[in-house]
Image (tube, grey):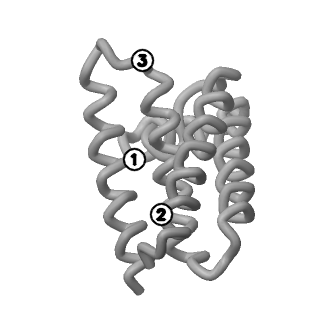
Amino acid sequence: MRLRIFYFGLAVLLIVVGLLSRRLPSIPEATGDALWAMMLFCCFRIVLVKTDLRKVAVVTLLTAYLVEFSQLIRWTWLVRLRATTLGHLVLGQGFLWSDLVAYTLGVALVFLLCWYLERIKIG
């Protein structure tokens, strides 16, 4: 239970920092993409708390890549959904190869952090 609480708190923190990063022009846009992927990792970890961290990282990356590639799809209902605030935050707006790099770096960073913290028994 402590592990789930930790990941929930980390996810909330990452959401706040991610939203703030979009308001500060001095922070590169890719930072928000990396933070989004890190938050997604935390959300998966809450549900998959007993699963090996490497598997959680793979599921997170596949999901992030799927969301990014889905931005190439221009179905009317999907475009309308992305035009909403929540749809934009969750599904993004336009495909960029650099977003895939940001997701990969974000997941790698949060994986290493969580691997270390779980190794020293946070949960």
Res 74 → quadrant: top right
For discs 1 and 2, the disc positioned in front in the rendered view: 2
Mark 2 is on which residue type? Leu
Circle 3 is placed at which residue position? Answer: 28
Q: Tell me the quadrant of the picture where the N terminus can be found.
A: bottom left
In this view, the residue farthest toward the front is: 120
Q: Which mark is residue 86?
A: 1
Q: Secondary structure at mark 3?
A: loop
Question: x, y percentage for residue 89?
Answer: 43, 41
Q: CA distance from mark 3 to mark 2?
A: 27 Å
Q: Secondary structure at mark 2?
A: helix
Q: Give above or below for 22 relative to 64.
A: above
Between discs 3 and 2, the one toward the N terminus: 3
Q: Tell which of 43 and 113 is nearer to you.
A: 113
Say whether residue 70 is left or right of residue 93.
right
Q: CA distance from mark 3 to mark 1?
A: 21 Å
Circle 2 is placed at which residue position? Answer: 117
Give me the residue at 72% from left, 61% from top. Answer: 54
Residue 68 visible to the viewer: yes
Q: CA distance from mark 1 to mark 2?
A: 31 Å
Residue 77 visible to the viewer: no
Q: Tell which of 78 and 122 is nearer to you.
A: 122
Mark 1 is on which residue type? Leu
Give me the residue at 50% from left, 24% from top. Answer: 30
